[in-house]
Amino acid sequence: MSRPPTSAGRALGVLVLLIATALALAVVLGGSDPPASGGLARQPEASQASVWAVGDSADGGEASKAVGAMIAAADPDHFLYLGDVYDDGTREDFANNYEPAFGALDPITLPTPGNHDWLNAAEGYDPYWAEHFDGSVPAYYSVEVAGWDLISLNSEAPHDAESEQWQWLRDELEPGGTCRIAFWHRPRYSAGSHGDESSIEPIWQLLAGRATLALNGHEHNMQRLREIDGITTLISGAGGKSHYSVKLSDERLAFADTENDGALALALEPGSVRWRFMAVNGDVLDRGEASCDP
């Protein structure tokens, strides 16, 4: 599996962004040289890795570019884009709205589609990521990173108990253990304005007892929910598009922020994960950790 090269133009753009943000953010979750994500083959195990995640960002605005700059400044090993390239996920939206904010991270990006991407996936999402995934990008997949299985699921494609995706996930989870982080767009559980996505239940039931974290976007805010079925949900959708409200009285809610743009940073090592919700000004809004059983 080859690592896609970064163009000179992108490198120059990243340098400008780094000057503005590196001093405030370089302390967050350093990492080793990032492995390529193209082709999604299994990666050699590393002892630790830094992974950042955000969605609902790519609208061409300055806020989304600031979030992209923050993540680039942290020099992560992997970047999970949790879906939605605005407005309609067309080829032009990827070129004009996604790439200026996050294009420099393409060689280390593991994407999942959002509802704004999927209807036009054939002209936007698929060809864009095909350039960085050795010619094609699967609708769902998994990658091993620092003792964890990162599983990209597709909330926009069929995921009921009769679907190919459900059957693939069932087989993926067969070895047992809980050292898995699943990520997709629409959260199964949320205290935000979209609320719970009941259609995800078949996927959730497979993950229960087999995963430690679920990472989602869709809600334009940051949330951490208390464990449900042994899984902690972390919603990182404050990528710069806008902000949605949260029902603070929801007893499942452990943390929420509806005012700041920012992203989620994870530090992985075999058997444990630490997370931080980071605002673009460098503030740590929430932090925590969890362990898993191999």
Image (tube, rainbow, N blue to C red):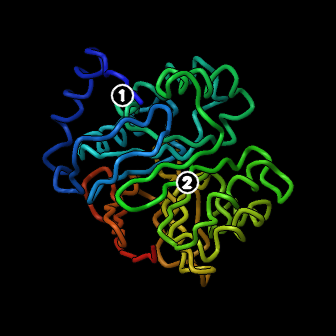
Q: Find residue 135 and report its horizontal and vertical position in percent.
A: 55, 21
Along the line of sight, which residue is nearer the eye, 4 or 274? 4
Quarter of the image where the C terminus is located: bottom left
Q: CA distance from mark 2 to mark 1?
A: 20 Å
Q: Residue at x 38, y 27 (%)?
A: 2
Of labels 2 and 1, earlier in sequence is: 1
Residue 184 in percent (x, y) is at 60, 52
Across and down, in percent, residue 95 comes to 50, 19
- Given residues 20 and 235, the one toward you in this image is 235
Amino acid on which disc 1 is placed: Arg
**Residue at the extreme right of the image, as rendered:** 162
Q: Can you name the residue that lies furthest to the bottom here?
A: 251
Residue underneath mark 2: 151
Q: Which element type, helix, strand or loop, lies under badge 1?
A: loop
User: What residue is rendered at 36% in x and 74% in y?
Assistant: 288
Residue density around tag 1, few if under 14, some if 14–19, many if 20 or more, within 10 Å: some
In the image, residue 1 above or below residue 233: above
Instruction: Please identify the quadrant where the N terminus is shown.
Output: top left
Q: Is residue 125 visible?
A: yes
Q: Which of 19 and 72 lies nearest the eye of the viewer?
A: 72
Picture layout, residue 245 above or below residue 2: below
Report the residue at 24% width, 43% height from top: 75
Cβ–Cβ under 8 Å for marks 2 and 1: no
Up/down of 210 relative to 168, above or below: below
Q: Amino acid at mark 2?
A: Ile
Q: Is residue 80 above or below residue 123?
A: below
Identify residue for label 1. Answer: 3
Q: Position of residue 192 (x, y in %)?
A: 62, 64
Classify residue 8 by image quadrant: top left
Q: 65 or 137: nearer the eye? A: 137
Give the residue drawn at x 67%, y 37%: 116
